[in-house]
Image: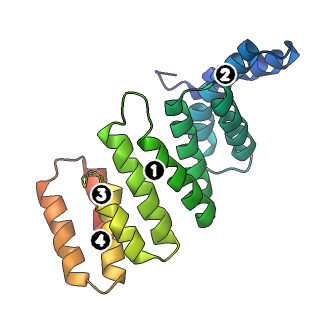
Amino acid sequence: LDRLAYRETLTPLRPALQLLVRLPESVERQQRRFAVMFAMAEPIRTLYGWSPSEMLPHYLATQRLCLEVGSRRQLFQNTYHLKSYFGMRGQHREALGYAQQILQMVHELEGGASPFEVTEAYNGMGVAYFRLGELASAHQYFTQGSPDLPVRASFRAFAMWLSGHVDQAQRMLAHYLARTNRPPFSRAIPLTV
């Protein structure tokens, strides 16, 4: 997985998942099943995208297993995947529901949440509200956490623009671009506004 061999990673994991079903029901079986399903998520997402319909049963089964045998951090990650799945499919109310769960979880993570996790939680709320057309709510969440994510800067500026604050949106993006050392692609995202 570390060397980006996604197809090769899935080759032994699919039969392993099928073999686990044959084991007697136990906590250990659920833990193993969860480990295999959690390991499959990134390769499947990378190979087939965030929102093919086949992913929903995988995410939901992984979510149930997270609640049974996973950690809060794993639950946080899988809930993030569910939020992204529904957001990419245009099901923004469902995405908002998962974003709300993520924001609640970020305060409950063992060892505390990283600044990136906190920012992602607020960003998820902002994007969901933005896509629902609730710009004031979106702006409220985009102003919390780290402002340095390119996508976040873009959505925040776009929400300001749509709210009639065009000059303010342009100034904010110019300020962001002037102080960032990000790669060209990351700099291009805010320029789309």
Number of the front mark, 1 or 4: 1
Q: Which residue is mark 1?
A: 103
Is disc 1 placed on a helix, strand or loop? Answer: helix
Q: Which residue is mark 4?
A: 157
Query: Which residue ends up furthest to the front in the rendered image?
Result: 108
Q: Quadrant of residue 156?
A: bottom left
Q: Which residue is mark 2?
A: 36
Crowd around label 3: few <14 · some 14–19 · many ≥20 (10 Å): some
Query: Which residue ends up furthest to the bottom in the rendered image?
Result: 164
Label 3 and label 4: CA atoms lie apart by 14 Å
Q: What's under tag 2, amino acid-wise?
A: Val
Q: What's under tag 4, amino acid-wise?
A: Ala
55 relative position to 90: left or right: right
Q: Of residues 182 and 122, which is closer to you in this image?
A: 122
Residue found at x 50% / y 26%: 4
114 relative position to 181: left or right: right
Q: Quadrant of residue 17?
A: top right
Q: Of residues 41 and 61, which is closer to you in this image?
A: 61
Q: What's under tag 1, amino acid-wise?
A: Leu
Crowd around label 4: few <14 · some 14–19 · many ≥20 (10 Å): many
Task: Give the image location of residue 43, x and y in percent.
Answer: 59, 32
